[in-house]
Image (cartoon, helix red, strand yellow):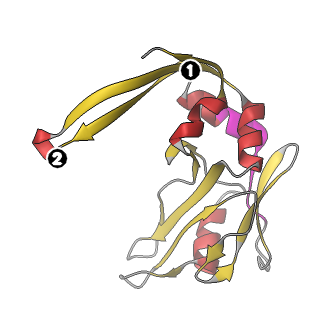
Amino acid sequence: MLTLFTKAPLPSRINRQLVEKFGHPAKHGKKVLHTTVNAVSKNNLYGKPAFIVLVQRTRIELVHDDYGDLPTPYWNSIDLEKAFNRKYPQNLLYVKADCRGRGRAEEFHYNEAWLMSGFSFPRFIELLVSGQILIDIRLGQYPDGRLHDHGTGFRVMPDNLDMCFNKREQIL
């Protein structure tokens, strides 16, 4: 999968609470929470049904049946659109290649290239609702207990990347 962008959920510091409540022990004795979530069905977290994405008009929520006293993590639609536009302010050139070899002997044969522009937030939402855009939660704790946030990633399969843009032109 390709990471479109990363954006921590709101409210502030909710990631620390998520890893403390739902994380599992890592090798160093602290907790990690690594899971992929979609809007189609609940994912499994350590063998139990866990999270699902709920897309609403102005926000996207990370829903779980057992938050207890925790607030529901969410993203504002406006913030997500800004995050995408910050990462892709102009055009995106997406190049595909076949490769062979490894290390210094690795070679590439570029066989396809697309020039894309005009991010479409409505299409992004459609892809999120249909389960084609996934959310990867990648949280952990350092040995001293501090949060290690690898970035909550909004990710897409490479073949669906072009669906996020209004203009798509194959140039190779």
Q: Is residue 129 left or right of residue 35?
A: right
Q: Residues within 10 Å of mark 2 (few under 14, many from 20)?
A: few
State whether residue 46 is above or below residue 135. Answer: below
Q: Residues under labels 2 and 1: Cα distance?
A: 30 Å
Q: Is residue 75 magenta?
A: yes
Name the residue that disc number 1 marks: 116
Q: Is residue 142 magenta?
A: no
Label 2 secondary element: loop
Can you see residue 74? yes
**Spot occupied by residue 11 in the image (x, y as percentages of width and height):** 72, 57
Question: What is the magenta range?
Answer: 72-82
**Spot occupied by residue 160 in the image (x, y as percentages of width and height):** 60, 38
Q: Is residue 118 left or right of residue 129?
A: left
Q: Earlier in the sequence, mark 2 or mark 1?
A: 2
Name the residue that disc number 2 marks: 102
* Residue drawn at the location 48% of the way across and 69% of the way down: 140
The image's mark for residue 104 is none
**Spot occupied by residue 108 in the image (x, y as percentages of width and height):** 24, 32
